[in-house]
Every structure is written in C-alpha cells, then in structure tokens.
Image (cartoon, coloured by chain):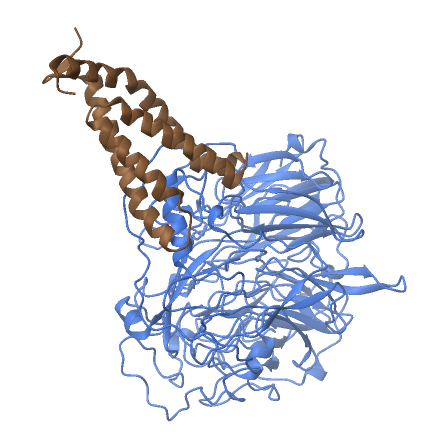
C-alpha cells in the first residue's frame, strides 16, 4: 500500500509539483520569449513556452499527454539547439542540459500519470 | 581606466532556475540622438579648451558637483607636506652612466619588464618544460599590506619585484619599499612611507620600483645606487639601494611632491602605480586620474625630473603644448586632459619615452574635448626627454568614448626591415585586442594598419563619432568576432533567455557602438578586454610573442544629469562624496558634462555569470619572425574558483577566465603566468602551449611574475596579492618557486 497524502500518493504529489515547475518555466518562456521575438530575436522560446505551458497544465491535471508534450518540447529543443550551434558542447550545455535532466524526471512520471488516468477512468471522470 | 565590480564567472551546469525577473537595466531616461552621417572634425571643443571654467566661473551650487577647478589645493593633498621643487634646464642634466637595466647581469631582472626593452624575457634556462613540474615553494614574503577591519577592500598589489645583484627590490601595495635576500626572502631593509588609507584611489597597487645608478654620487657613497618609486599619494621617492635610507640630495630630503601644479584635488583622485622609467638621466612620471568623476578632473600631465637632484625639467601638458614649465601661483596644468596610467617605456638611444595614453576625463562623452586632446588620447606618444614635446603620436582609437585607454606597456624589439636591416620597433598591445607594431623612430606602422569605417548610428547630440578607426591587419586580432544573440550563455535556458533579451534590448553595431541614452549599449571588447597592464612578453631568440587577453563585454548607458543625481553619483572631490557615490570603473557622475554614466558587466546580475559564452580569457603565442602566425592559442584559467553566485565549482575545466597580469618567457622555453581568476600560477611550454606545471597561490595572482638567478639557481616570483575587481582573494604574499634542493 503506497503512502498516501489525502487521496494521492507521494509520487503523484511530486508529479504535480513537477507540473507546476514546468508551468512556471513555460510562463517565463512565453513572456520572455514573446519579448525576445518582438525585439527581433529567436522565436524558439515563445513556441517552446507554449508547449511547456500546455504540458505542465496537462500534468497538473494528471494527464499523460502532459508528459508527452514536455518530451515533445525537449525534442524540439534538441533539434533547435543543434541547428543553432551544432555539436558544440559548451553551447549545448545551457540549451539542453537542464531541460534533459527535467525530461528524465518527466519520463519517470509517465507511469504515475497513467495510474492517475486509470483511476479516473475507473471513477468515470475522464 | 581600470575596472570595477566583478567579472568572476563560470561554468557548472546545475539545474538552477533564475528568478522570473524583468530586465532590470535602467528605464529610458531621455531622448537619443538622431542618426548622423556628419563627419566630425578633430574635435568639438575649441582649441586651447575654452570650455574649461576660469577663475571667474561661479562654482556650481549643486550638491552633486565638485568645487571650482580653481579652488586652492587643500593642505593634506600634498601628503608629506613637501615644499615646492625648483626647476632646472633639461640641458643641464648630467650625462647618465650605463644603467643596470640597459644590460642586466645574466641572472638579474633589472627593470619592471626585465630590462630597458621591457620584453619580459629572461636568458635563464635551468627551468625547462621537462623539469618544471618539480617546482616547489622556496620562500614566501609578507608585505604587510592588506585591508584591515573596517577598510573597504581596494587591494590589488600587482607588484613585480626587480632583482639587481644581491637584492630583490619591491614595494608593498601601499608603497613601502623593501630589499629582500633573493635566496631566502629575508628582509634586508624596509622603508615605510606611512601612506594613508585615504590615498588609495580605485586600487592599492604598486607595480614596481626603478633601479638607478648615479653619475654624481661616487661608488661606495650612499645613494650611488638608488631605488625610485612613485606613490599612490603622489610622491616621487628615492632611497639608497644599500640601506633603504632616503636620498637627501634628491628633491626635498629624498622626496618630490607630484601634486605640485595639479591644483584642486583630494587624496585618491590622482595616483602613481607604475615604476617611472629613467631615460638619459630624466625620470619620467605619469599618473592615473580616477575615471568617471568630472570633466575638469586634475590634469593628466606627464613630467620629467632630474634623476640625480629630483628637480623639475619639463611638463607635457596637452592643452599648453608650447609651455613646458611648472604653473605658478593659482594656475594649474590644464584640467581634464588624457591621463596615462600604464607603465611607460624609455629609449635611451632615441632619447624618447613611449607614453601609452588614456582618455580625457569623462570617458564616455567627447564633445568638450579640445582638438589637442583628440590628437593624443588612447595613443602611443613618443616624448622627447630633452624637451617634453611629442616627436610622434600614433593613435589606437579616435575620439575614444569606450574607455579603450591603453593599459599595456610598450615592448621594444627589432623587426626585420625591407633591406634586411633590423628596424627598431615597438609593440603596442591595446584593450581592443589590436596589437600595433610601429617604427619607434617615427611612429609609422611596420605591419599594415587600415582605417576602417566605424558605423555609429544614433549618436549623442553634438557628439559625433569619427567615420573610421584603425585596425592592425598585420597582427592576429586578440578578440572573438562581434557578439551575436546565439553567443549568449548561462546555466540553463532561463538565464540564457534573460541574456538574449538583454542583448536585444541594447544598442550594438560592433566594437565602436556609440554611447547611448535611450537604451544601454554593449561595449565589446570592454575596458577590461583585450590586453591590459600585464602587457606582453617577447622571446627575441625564438621570435615568439606571448599575449594573454580578455573577452569581457560591458553593458553601459548614459544617463541624464537628473538621473545621475538620483543615483547619487558625484565626483570624488565633492564635499558630500561618500564611498559608493560613483567609482572608477562603475557608475560615474561625469560632472561638468550633460550626462552621467552607468557601467556594468554584460552579465546576468542574478547569477553573477557573464552573459556571453566562455572563454573569457585566452593566451596566444604569435610567431613574429615568420609572418605573425598564431602558433598556439587556448583558454587560460579553470572554473575551479569561479561559478554562479560567486561559488567555486572546483571544476578543473579550462573554461578561460578573465585574467589580469602578464607573462614571462625564458630561454628555457618556459612561459610563466598567473593572471587568471583561478588563483593558479602556470608554467607553459613556449613552443606547444602545453601547461606543464601549475600551483595554487594563496591569493589571486594578478601580477606580472618575474624570474631571476641567485646562488646559481633559477627562481620564479609572483605577487599573489589578489585583485578586488577580479574578486580574487587578497593576500600580502610574494611567493617564490625553485626546483628542489634549492629551497632557501
């Protein structure tokens, strides 16, 4: 029997916290990225921010789709960064290291999100 | 002039999310200038500088303004209360005897840059790339100068000892002079000069002392051999090399008051930090004037004194080009003229002193400068030591408003001429990373120099820029290409995005982006970029030139007078001035101009990391004998002592940190250098660039190392004094290394 807090397990709470973190990052990306795009800079951040925001919201809602949206944003990030700076480790570091670490955590939440979805299906709330 | 704040930076990939903060630069504070295609004349100030207030100009009533430039000099500004020094005819200067620095003994290091050429080359060869990894500490010497409780850390000793015969001569950060036993570090004598803390300008530094042999005092008599020093509180001091006692026959009891003729000032406004060169019996002094204070700061005058008697010989006052005398009565040398704070180089054969100049006071606004000032700022000026008149001038930046003043000392060497005959040459490194190689007889470039267009959109009204700037196309540029948005760095995409926005919000059209008031502008290379006071070392045998340099952009903005007042900016001589009211390298009042200046590193102010990608510091070897090719080049300095929020990461990654302090090259094929903010000293193979040895110092190694031989063995000395601006730990230790079995 897993530890429960209210009617959620610890891993479910951690998943929620991760979702909130991704929402905050997404907000920063959308707001700052819009600013940057309007200043004539890269549009990557605002586009990626929309994916992150959506991903975070779905994760908080306990939807597996949220995790996949994040992983999609991560794939976009890698493709974009390789396009922008090539295989230069120093330049890939700020662009991909943090998001990839976060991506590992997000991947770990997929079973948790599945369980949450299944539970809701059983309750008929999906 | 020099720097402020930190530039400590680094790597370390932690998953850290910077706060969600808006760009915190200053809000637009006024109207920008309209773009102009006007070609400016040599200057906007009229000849003779009629903008300078006169005795009858009423002093400003604002509490943010300094006193009238005609106010009398307060008594304490002449630190030792010395009487005025008399003048003598330069033609009466006695013939100088050959000096130690002209041809140092094999194991000596007789001048700041080893000898009169200032090559920083030693013929010693005991230490080689093969055995350098065995170097051990032979001894340490404590100078006793470091910040005491309650004192702001303004320390950066930057000292290089000299070694002549049986003594190692050096100064402390506060100008006490000492002679040490070169094998043990034992103090043979020490001359305390009792300098006050208030006299420390931006930085407590004493780069070195000068050794002089008199032609008038017979051998064996006191002061036949002398140590000369210029001090932070503007004294020129001569002591006997054997005993450390003041030379009574020099100046007033061994001292000359260098505040004479400078007029209104306060302690810490003007100061000397470099060893004065002695050319054909003339000791030449320059001084730094604190940046950013006011348009009518004390003069940047260069003066010559008789090295025997200390009597005044001539002055080179930019705005009084035909008057080489000392001002009398209530007069003073013309104010606000370009100052020179770098070490100067003497040339006995040509009777010249090569003066690397800085900028007129109020660095970032040029509309009040005279044509005379515009001709000689940020230039190499060859002054005739007989007259104090320039024989030639080579300018490295026209109408400098970027603080690209020259910090480096010129190095003298021979370049192969067109007919195979060697041409007496001079290498002048600059903060722009452009290295100029000039014929020292006439100042003409030996390697090609091109005047290239310098786009300058949106200039400040009434202060147009020049259409072109000089580029040394025959030498490898010690810089990276102009910054792009994709060069922005960080620990994560969060701080990278922050820096990208910062980059896009600023004006930036390359190296000569003009100052702006509507929004910040990026200054790259910044005032700590390229080559600074560490200068370069040159091996005349191999023809290899060693240069360490910085990639440290700045983020600056002019502000209206109202905004400057709101920021509390005021000149140092304002009676209301308190520390923090505008400093040398940070924000400045620029009182007397329409604008103040806000200067910050181009960084993420929340993490303390630079916005641009590493490296931030590099070291380069250039083959001067075969087409000025880069032999090797790599980042200098690891991330071990740097990181976000100023935390050391301990990482051995050679990220390339900002560095200050130069190198030494030896016949053994080893380059010694500290300089980087990782607080290490390194031995590098001159031919391959491989680091063959490194050791951690007790403080920052922001000083030029030197090497000498004593008792038959080679020693390497470095002042690990630290540097407040580079944010490296301060210590008062001179650390001297040698191979095992030769420990003192």
Horizontal side, residue B143 vs residue B425: left or right: left
A55 w.r.t. B344: above or below: above
Q: Residue furthest bottom?
A: B56
Residue B524 or residue B47, whichever sits in front: B524
Q: Quadrant of residue A28?
A: top left
Q: Residue furthest right?
A: B419
Residue B442 or residue B560, whichever sits in front: B560
Q: Residue furthest left?
A: A6
Quadrant holding the C terminus of chain B: top right
Q: Residue furthest top?
A: A1
Q: Position of residue B399 (x, y in %)?
A: 54, 74
Chain B takes which shade in the image?
blue
Q: How many marks?
A: 0
Residue B278 or residue B598, whichever sits in front: B598
Horizontal side, residue A83 vs residue A4: left or right: right
Chain A takes which shade in the image?
brown
Q: Position of residue B300 (x, y in %)?
A: 52, 75
Q: Quadrant of residue B119?
A: bottom right
A40 w.r.t. B306: above or below: above
B726 w.r.t. B376: above or below: above
Residue B635 or residue B187, whichever sits in front: B635
- Residue at the image point whose x is 74% and y is 74% from the top: B351
- Residue at the image point whose x is 12% and y is 16% from the top: A124
Q: Position of residue B553 (x, y in %)?
A: 48, 55
Q: Position of residue B9 (x, y in %)?
A: 44, 44
* Any part of residue A43 in sight: yes
* Any part of residue B649 in sight: no
Q: Quadrant of residue B688?
A: top right
């Amino acid at each position: 029997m897993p530890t429960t807090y209210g009617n959620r397990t610890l891993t479910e709470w951690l998943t929620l916290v991760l979702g909130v973190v991704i929402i905050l990052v997404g907000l920063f990306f959308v707001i700052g990225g819009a600013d940057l795009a309007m200043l004539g800079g890269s549009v990557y951040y605002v586009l990626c921010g929309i994916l992150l925001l959506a991903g975070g919201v779905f994760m908080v809602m306990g939807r597996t789709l949220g995790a996949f949206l994040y992983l999609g944003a991560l794939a976009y990030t890698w493709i974009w960064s390789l396009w922008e700076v090539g295989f230069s480790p120093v330049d890939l570091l700020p662009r991909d290291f943090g998001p990839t670490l976060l991506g590992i955590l997000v991947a770990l939440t997929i079973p948790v999100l599945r369980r949450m979805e299944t539970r809701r299906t059983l309750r008929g709330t999906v | 002039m020099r720097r402020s704040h930190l530039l400590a930076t680094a790597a370390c990939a932690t998953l850290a999310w910077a706060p969600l903060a808006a760009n915190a630069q200053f809000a637009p504070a006024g109207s920008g200038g309209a773009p102009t295609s006007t070609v400016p004349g040599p200057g906007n100030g009229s000849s003779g500088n009629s903008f300078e207030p006169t005795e009858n100009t009423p002093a400003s009533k604002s509490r943010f303004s300094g006193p009238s430039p005609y106010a009398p000099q307060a008594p304490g500004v002449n630190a030792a209360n010395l009487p005025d020094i008399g003048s003598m005819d330069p033609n009466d200067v006695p013939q100088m005897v050959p000096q130690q620095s002209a041809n140092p003994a094999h194991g000596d290091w007789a001048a700041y840059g080893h000898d009169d050429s200032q090559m920083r080359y030693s013929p010693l060869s005991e230490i080689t790339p093969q055995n350098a990894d065995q170097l051990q500490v032979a001894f340490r010497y404590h100078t006793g100068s470091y910040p005491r409780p309650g004192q702001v850390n303004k320390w950066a000793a930057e000292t290089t000892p000299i070694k002549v015969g049986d003594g190692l001569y050096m100064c402390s950060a506060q100008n006490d002079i000492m002679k040490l036993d070169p094998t043990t570090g034992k103090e043979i004598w020490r001359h305390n000069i009792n300098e006050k803390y208030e006299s420390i300008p931006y930085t407590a530094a004493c780069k070195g002392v000068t050794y002089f042999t008199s032609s008038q005092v017979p051998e064996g008599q006191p002061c036949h051999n002398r140590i000369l020093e210029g001090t932070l509180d503007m004294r020129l001091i001569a002591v006997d090399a054997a005993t450390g006692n003041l030379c009574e026959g020099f100046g007033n009891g061994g001292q000359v008051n260098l505040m004479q003729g400078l007029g209104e000032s306060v302690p810490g406004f003007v100061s000397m930090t470099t060893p004065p060169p002695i050319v054909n019996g003339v000791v030449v002094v320059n001084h730094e004037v604190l940046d950013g204070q006011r348009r009518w700061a004390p003069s940047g005058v260069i003066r010559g004194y008789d090295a025997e008697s200390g009597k005044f010989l001539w002055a080179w006052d930019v705005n009084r080009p035909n008057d080489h005398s000392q001002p009398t009565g209530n007069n003073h040398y013309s104010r606000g003229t370009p100052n020179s704070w770098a070490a100067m180089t003497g040339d006995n054969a040509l009777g010249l002193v090569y003066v690397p100049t800085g900028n007129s006071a109020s660095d970032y606004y040029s509309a009040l400068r005279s044509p005379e000032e515009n001709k000689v700022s940020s230039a190499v000026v060859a002054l005739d030591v007989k007259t104090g008149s320039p024989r030639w001038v080579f300018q490295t930046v026209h109408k400098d408003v970027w603080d690209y003043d020259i910090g480096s000392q010129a190095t003298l060497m021979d370049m192969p001429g067109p007919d195979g005959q060697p041409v007496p040459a001079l290498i002048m490194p600059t903060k722009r990373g452009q290295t100029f190689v000039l014929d020292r007889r006439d100042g003409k470039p030996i390697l090609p120099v091109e005047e290239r267009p310098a786009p300058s959109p949106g200039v400040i009204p009434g202060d147009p820029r020049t259409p072109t700037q000089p580029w040394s196309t025959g030498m490898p540029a010690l810089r990276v290409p102009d910054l792009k948005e994709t060069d922005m760095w960080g620990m994560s995409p969060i701080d990278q995005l922050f820096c990208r926005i910062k980059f896009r919000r600023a004006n930036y059209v390359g190296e000569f982006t003009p100052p702006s008031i509507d929004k910040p502008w990026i200054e790259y290379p910044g005032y700590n970029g390229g080559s600074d006071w560490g200068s370069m070392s040159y091996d005349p045998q191999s023809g290899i030139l060693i240069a360490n340099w910085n990639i440290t952009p700045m983020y600056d903005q002019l502000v209206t007078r109202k905004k400057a007042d709101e920021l509390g900016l005021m000149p140092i001589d304002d009676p209301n001035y308190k520390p923090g009211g505008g400093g040398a390298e940070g924000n400045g009042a620029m009182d007397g101009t329409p604008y103040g200046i806000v200067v910050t590193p181009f960084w993420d102010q929340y993490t303390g990391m630079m916005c641009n990608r590493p490296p931030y510091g590099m070291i380069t070897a250039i083959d001067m004998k075969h087409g000025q090719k880069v032999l090797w080049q790599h980042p200098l300095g690891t991330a071990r002592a740097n990181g976000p929020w100023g935390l050391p990461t301990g990482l051995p990654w050679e990220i390339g940190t900002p560095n200050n302090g130069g190198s030494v090259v030896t016949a053994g094929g080893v380059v010694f250098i500290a300089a980087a903010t990782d607080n290490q000293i390194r031995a590098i193979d001159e031919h391959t660039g491989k680091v063959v040895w490194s050791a951690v110092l007790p403080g920052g190694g922001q000083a030029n190392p030197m090497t000498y031989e004593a008792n038959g063995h080679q020693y390497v000395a470095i002042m690990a004094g630290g540097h407040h601006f580079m944010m490296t730990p301060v210590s008062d230790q001179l650390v001297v290394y040698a191979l095992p079995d030769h420990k003192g």
